[in-house]
Amino acid sequence: MQTLADIVTAVSEGIARRKARIAKRKLDAQKDNVTNGSLLRIFRTRMGITYDDFVGMDAHIRQWISRVENGRAIITPEIARRFVTTIEGLKKKTKTQ
């Protein structure tokens, strides 16, 4: 037989899971509203990425957005560095082919 504490714990865990699911859905919707221009602006100003480097990568970048504030994407510096190394790797592959 379950005690009252077990029931309260189960209910609060369910509520926490639901809140997390709603927050994830909200972030995903906000990510979709971020324009490619604003994403490119982030990388162009920080790392000198050109539009040609950026084409086709926007879907990957959207996955890396950690949060959205006032319609602008916030990407952590670690993620930005990872993106730049990915771009540099792609450039090297295309030069050797």
Image (tube, helix red, strand yellow):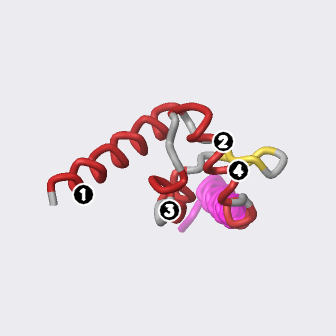
Disc nearer the start of the sequence (3/4)? 4
- Please name whichever residue, 40 or 97, is drawn nearer the observer in this view of the structure: 97
Pointer 3 residue: 55
Percent of width and height locating residue 67: 67, 46
Which numbered disc covers residue 38? 4
Q: Choose mark 3 or mark 4, whichever is in front.
A: 3
The stretch of residues the image draws in magenta is 1-28
Q: Residue at x 65, y 65 (%)?
A: 21
Label 2 belongs to which residue? 74
Q: Earlier in the sequence, mark 3 or mark 2?
A: 3
How far is mark 4 from mark 2, CA to CA? 10 Å
Q: Mark 3 touching mark 1, by CB under 8 A?
A: no
Q: Quadrant of residue 26?
A: bottom right
- In the rendered structure, the answer to whether residue 73 lies left or right of residue 46 reads right
Q: Which amino acid does label 4 sit on?
A: Ser
By secondary structure, the bulk of the magenta-drawn segment is best described as helix
Q: Is residue 73 above or below residue 4?
A: above
- Image quadrant holding the C terminus, namely bottom left
The numbered mark at residue 94 is 1
Nearer-N-terminus badge (3/1): 3
Three-letter amino acid code at the position of disc 1: Thr
Q: Is mark 4 on a helix, strand or loop?
A: helix
Q: Residue 11 carries which label?
A: none
